Image (cartoon, rainbow, N blue to C red):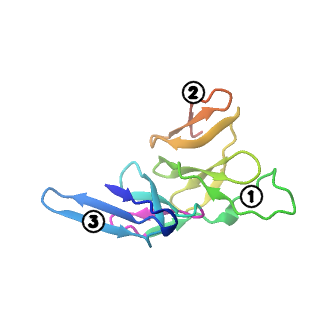
Amino acid sequence: MGLSVGEGQDGSPLRWGRWDGSQLTVTRIGDDDRCLVDVSPCGTRLLTIDHWGRRPAIHRLPDGAVTHEVADHQILPHPQTPSDVEEEPFWGYQCGFVDERTVIASTIEGYGPPRHWLIDTTRGDVLGQVEYPMPVSEDPMALGDGTWLTCCEEDPFRLLLWSLP
């Protein structure tokens, strides 16, 4: 079981606990500045975002070591950002494993709507921005079986199910 303890501006300690039938083992993961956002479908990796929404990271279990961080330089500036503004994106906390090899995550920027990105979990590389055939709202919700959900922009009570090509 994973547990992130949000402490506001003081950080977000992350613990990973395991009960083997006779003994409870709890491991401290990271530097008390990582928020647990998802566990891979096979349960061997974690996806975290740092406390300030800047660096998504993939960790291996059971030791919690970071195998890959997603670099901001892989994200193109939002097309609605004025040319004289230099802004780093914030990553949304509702992201996750689409499947074992792919994460979907969103960036939230000061200009324009959030954008969704596919990330390769084996290298931490951004594969590209998701282009939807219709406007969607909210962050994506990965289901771990090759699909994810978004809400329709016109009707926020209408869920849209997406899959990898």
Q: Are marks 3 and 2 in contact (CB under 8 Å)?
A: no
Q: Check disc 1 and report its element: helix, strand or loop.
A: loop
Q: Which of pointers 1 and 2 indicates the residue nearer the eye?
A: 2
Q: Distance between the residues labelled 3 and 2?
A: 39 Å
How far across and how far down the image is residue 112, in percent?
A: 76, 47
Q: Which of 81 and 62 is in front in this view?
A: 81
Which residue appears at 65% of the width and 53% of the height? Answer: 107
Q: In this view, does 49 lie above or below 41?
A: below
Q: Is mark 3 on a helix, strand or loop?
A: strand
Give the amino acid at mark 3: Val
Say whether residue 34 is left or right of residue 138: left
Mark 1, residue position:
76
Q: Residue furthest bottom?
A: 31
Residue 34 x %, y %: 47, 64
Residue marked by disc 2: 157
Q: Where is residue 76 in the image (x, y as percent from the top left)?
A: 74, 58
Q: Is residue 56 left or right of residue 78?
A: left
**Alpha carbon of mark 1 to alpha carbon of mark 2: how far?**
30 Å
Q: Which of marks 3 and 2 is nearer the N terminus?
A: 3
Judging by the rendered image, the residue that carries numbered circle 3 is 26
Identify the magenta region: 54-65
